[in-house]
Amino acid sequence: MWTYRERLNYFEKTRRSLYEILRDALEMRLMKISLIDSFYNYLKHGVEYRFPEKRELKPKSKRMERESELFNTFLVIFCEGVISPELKNYIRFFPDNKLVKKNVDYLSDLTLYKNFNQNLRYFDKPRFLEFVDSLLNVDYALLIQQDPTVKKKNRYALTHFHVKIDWPISNAAEDLAIWLRYLQHNLYEKGDKHGHNLQNKLFEYYGSHHSVGGRRTAGLIAAQLLRKMDFISTIFISSSEARSMIKYSERNVSKFFLIKLDDSQIIALAQREGMDSATFKTAYLYPAVDYYVGISEAVYTHTPHSTPPESGKLRRLDSAYNWLKLRDEFLHPKSSSPALRPINYNWVYTTE
């Protein structure tokens, strides 16, 4: 289990501060790639973009549809420390998928950097995020973590690509349920139905329905597995099926998605924030044909039923109780407006 900042030594606090700064930069870039770039892909190809419906952002929502090649999908794992070799059987990072020239040469469609330079993989290099962008369409996950091979401390690198997540769902559910004190030893100790319900609850804990596709399943499994480490980690998942980017971190669960705003909504928001409409559009919104879109974030928190009981005693599972609830909603400014903060924009539970 990761360690709270208050219990870190000075050097560890420095590392965490750096990690959080880099994570913010990565998050901003991935939001654009997942949502804005995908949106304009749809417009460019004359295909209607389906905005997420309100019910899809509510806990326990179920939505299934065919994926689209126009939506940029990815799975990125960003770790504060170095993943233990003991987890290699489950998060598969080996010499054959390490980010070195001989392995990158197998990617015939990687045209951005024909002459691969080892320094490209380091987060402190100017074009690192551009390099990450060029690798996102490689199947499975990208792994960014501290590079244990360099002497310089706190240097982060894209160490591996084509990283498979191979931990059984049943093991992940068992691990979570024991921590939450719904189990003592193993998943099926209270019968098959109880074990099946706990597997469904694993998905709910991470803001998904148990019917979701492989990338989202891999992401939540990785998030649960990395809880075993004593450092924090962040999982970013871009899903075509959900039309959203999902983030798992020590701050729980977030979903980033596009919202469509008409002129009346823009005027009302601009007035509330003390701006004129033109300034608000420039700072927060992206133009379409006859409307604008913005990046919204729904932030979720866990309920008492999905947090460990203070008594530490075993408890009964009631599947009817929600394990996740919506805590907050934000509309994010564009990356070109770094001086502005996200603004409150409640949308999911409004009736309009």
Image (spheres, rainbow, N blue to C red):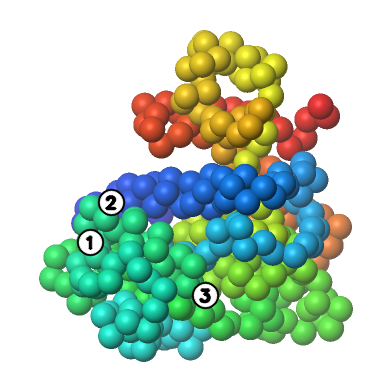
Q: Which residue shows up at 45% across the image and 34% down it? A: 334
**Alpha-carbon distance for marks 2 and 1?**
8 Å
Neighbourhood count class around disc 2 (C-alpha, 10 Å): few under 14, some 14–19, many 20 upward: some
Q: Which residue shows up at 60% across the image and 38% down it? A: 296
Residue 72 appearing in the image: yes
Q: Which residue shows up at 46% across the image and 59% down it? A: 234
Residue ID for mark 2: 18
Neighbourhood count class around disc 1 (C-alpha, 10 Å): few under 14, some 14–19, many 20 upward: many
Instruction: Identify the amino acid type marked 3.
Output: Tyr
Who comes first in sequence, dot 1 or dot 3? 3
Neighbourhood count class around disc 3 (C-alpha, 10 Å): few under 14, some 14–19, many 20 upward: some
Who comes first in sequence, dot 2 or dot 1? 2
Relative vertical location of residue 316 with respect to residue 295 in this rendering, above or below = below
Label 2 with label 1: CB-CB less than 8 Å:
yes
Marker disc for residue 247: none
**For residue 186, side relative to residue 27 (left or right):** right
Instruction: Identify the amino acid type marked 2.
Output: Leu
Residue ID for mark 1: 154
* Image x and y of residue 290, in percent: 66, 28
**Alpha-carbon distance for marks 1 and 3?**
26 Å
**For residue 319, side relative to residue 91 (left or right):** right
Relative vertical location of residue 199 with respect to residue 275 in this rendering, above or below = below
Instruction: Identify the amino acid type marked 1.
Output: Asn
Quarter of the view holding residue 195: bottom right
User: Is label 3 or label 2 in front?
Assistant: 3
Q: Which residue shows up at 27% across the image and 55% down it? A: 127
Who comes first in sequence, dot 3 or dot 2? 2
Disc 3 is placed on an element classified as loop
Label 3 with label 2: CB-CB less than 8 Å:
no
Disc 2 is placed on an element classified as helix
Front-lying residue, 4 or 171: 171
User: Is label 1 or label 3 in front?
Assistant: 3
